[in-house]
């Protein structure tokens, strides 16, 4: 087997950020950022109710190979999201039910795969968040090489180890840590505006004032 290059696992996100983000949505945070934060629209949750927030453990693999992902599962811990650059490869799945069960048992926060998965019948009802481009029956090779916790490109975004990662039914966003506090504050303000706007619509004031 080829060697897998492992770098130190990143610091997890502050609990306050995680709790606040889970009260918001990817759409709210996307609306208040002035840099691209959205992954490719094809990367979606297999359980539509999944909400994922955590610190990115970045993984680069060869096409159709998942040896580095196996290593990363045991090189990570609670609060980490495994973000896998699989180059959108469409002939082999990168993860399946067994790897998700292992990650869940170790209390990791989820998977984001720029590629395919398998065992959809099980994972579509799992409480463990799994985001990917699609599914295929074919399994991966386990030959390597691979790299863990270096900057990668995943879903059209540069992702650094330790970046803020969030996923929900609308897709996945990634923010550098330096941008997170401001983004959360602005998103919370926007959430209050939208709550008031929905009440106004329910009260019969359908046309927004800014349109006049």
Image (cartoon, rainbow, N blue to C red):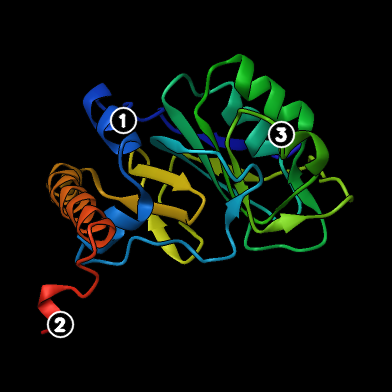
Tell me the SS state at disc 2.
helix
Per the model, the C-alpha gap separating discs 1 and 2 is: 35 Å
Give whichever of discs 3 and 2 has the lower sequence position: 3
Circles 1 and 2 in contact, beta carbons < 8 Å: no
Asked whether the viewer can see residue 63, the reply is no
- Residue 68 rendering spot, x and y as whole percentages: 64, 38
In the rendered view of the protein, which quadrant contains the N terminus? Answer: top right
Q: Of all residues shown, which one is farthest toward the top?
A: 105
In the rendered view of the protein, which quadrant contains the C terminus? Answer: bottom left
- Give me the residue at 31% from left, 36% from top: 23
12 to the left or right of 122: left
Q: Which residue is mark 3?
A: 125
- Give me the residue at 63% from left, 52% from top: 132
Q: Which residue is mark 1?
A: 18
Per the model, the C-alpha gap separating discs 3 and 2 is: 42 Å
Name the foreground residue: 26 vs 59. Answer: 26
Foreground tag (3 vs 1): 3
Q: Which residue is mark 2?
A: 211
Circles 3 and 1 in contact, beta carbons < 8 Å: no
Give whichever of discs 1 and 2 has the lower sequence position: 1
Tell me the SS state at disc 3.
loop
- Give me the residue at 44% from left, 33% from top: 7
Tell me the SS state at disc 1.
helix
Q: Of all residues shown, which one is farthest toward the front?
A: 204
Name the foreground residue: 118 vs 20. Answer: 20
Name the foreground residue: 93 vs 168. Answer: 168
């Amino acid at each position: 087997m080829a060697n897998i290059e492992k770098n130190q696992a990143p610091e997890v996100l502050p609990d306050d950020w995680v709790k606040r983000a889970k009260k918001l949505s990817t759409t709210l945070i996307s609306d208040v950022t002035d840099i691209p934060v959205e992954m490719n629209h094809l990367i979606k949750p297999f359980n539509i109710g999944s909400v994922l927030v955590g610190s990115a453990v970045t993984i680069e693999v060869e096409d159709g190979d998942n040896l580095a992902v196996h290593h990363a599962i045991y090189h990570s811990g609670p609060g980490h999201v495994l973000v896998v650059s699989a180059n959108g490869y469409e002939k082999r799945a990168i993860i399946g039910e067994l790897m998700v069960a292992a990650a869940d048992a170790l209390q990791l926060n989820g998977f984001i795969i720029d590629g395919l998965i398998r065992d959809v019948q099980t994972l579509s009802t799992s409480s463990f968040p799994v985001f990917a481009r699609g599914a295929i029956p074919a399994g991966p090779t386990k030959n390597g090489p691979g790299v863990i916790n270096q900057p990668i490109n995943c879903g059209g975004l540069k992702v650094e180890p330790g970046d803020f990662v969030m996923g929900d039914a609308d897709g996945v966003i990634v923010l550098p840590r330096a941008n997170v506090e401001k983004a959360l504050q602005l998103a919370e303000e926007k959430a209050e505006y939208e709550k008031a706007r929905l009440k106004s619509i329910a009260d019969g004031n359908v046309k927004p004032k800014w349109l006049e």
